[in-house]
Image (cartoon, rainbow, N blue to C red):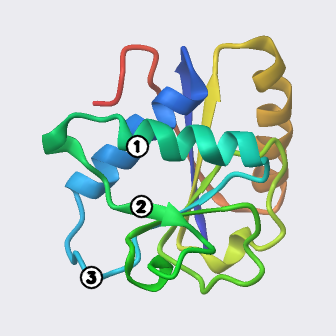
């Protein structure tokens, strides 16, 4: 069954997502494996994530691309506005305010919640959705960063 991780208390949801992706990349065990699908249903959000991942320091690059890229099949981090056409991967980083209908195809779902008011209510609804369906939930406060 899919495990769900809520990381709450971020100052900025996107910056925290990029930090989490760097940590996931650093912890990888197989560099050829698909690592994460980033679900960003809004084009501006997908562009911001893509840009932020390119702006990291030279030693911190996370190989990534948009789902429509010819390199997507061999890239560990895929940014996509849809999950329907993608194979299931180990982890899904959900940057939508909704629970993606295909989330259960993933081993893990990561939800990042900022301290911003508009982000909290949809996150509570997602948490409630997962809890009511019996998914294993883990919570971590990241207001001081990822440990």
Residue 32 marker: 3
Among the two numbered marks 1 and 3 on one chain, the one whose residue lies closer to the N terminus: 3
Residue tagged 2: 64
User: Looking at the image, is 39 positioned above or below residue 44?
Assistant: below
Which callout, 1 or 2, points at the residue further toward the start of the chain?
1
Q: How many marks?
A: 3
Residue at figure coordinates x 22%, y 75% from the top left? 31
**33 relative to 131 in the view: left or right:** left
Q: Cα distance, mark 1 to mark 2? A: 8 Å
SS type, badge 2: strand
* Label 1 residue SS: helix
Q: Nearer the viewer, residue 131 or 30?
A: 30
Residue 63 point in image, percent of width and height: 33, 61
| Residue bearing mark 1 | 53
Q: Look at the numbered disc 3 and give the secondary structure of its residue.
A: loop
Q: Is residue 91 above or below residue 70?
A: above
Measuring from the top left, give residue 94's x and y in whole percent.
Answer: 66, 51
Packing grade of label 2 (10 A; few <14, some 14-19, many >=20) is many
């Amino acid at each position: 069954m899919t495990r769900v991780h809520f990381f709450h208390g971020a100052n900025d949801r996107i910056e925290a997502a990029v930090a989490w992706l760097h940590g996931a990349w650093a912890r990888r065990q197989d560099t050829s494996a698909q690592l994460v699908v980033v679900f960003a249903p809004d084009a501006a959000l997908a562009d911001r994530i893509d840009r932020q991942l390119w702006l990291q320091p030279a030693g911190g690059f996370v190989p990534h691309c948009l789902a429509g890229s010819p390199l997507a099949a061999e890239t560990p981090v895929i940014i996509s506005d849809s999950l329907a056409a993608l194979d299931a991967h180990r982890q899904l980083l959900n940057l939508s305010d909704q629970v993606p209908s295909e989330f259960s195809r993933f081993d893990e779902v990561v939800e990042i919640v900022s301290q911003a008011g508009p982000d909290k209510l949809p996150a509570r609804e997602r948490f409630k959705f997962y809890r009511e369906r019996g998914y294993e939930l883990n919570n971590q406060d990241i207001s001081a960063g990822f440990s």
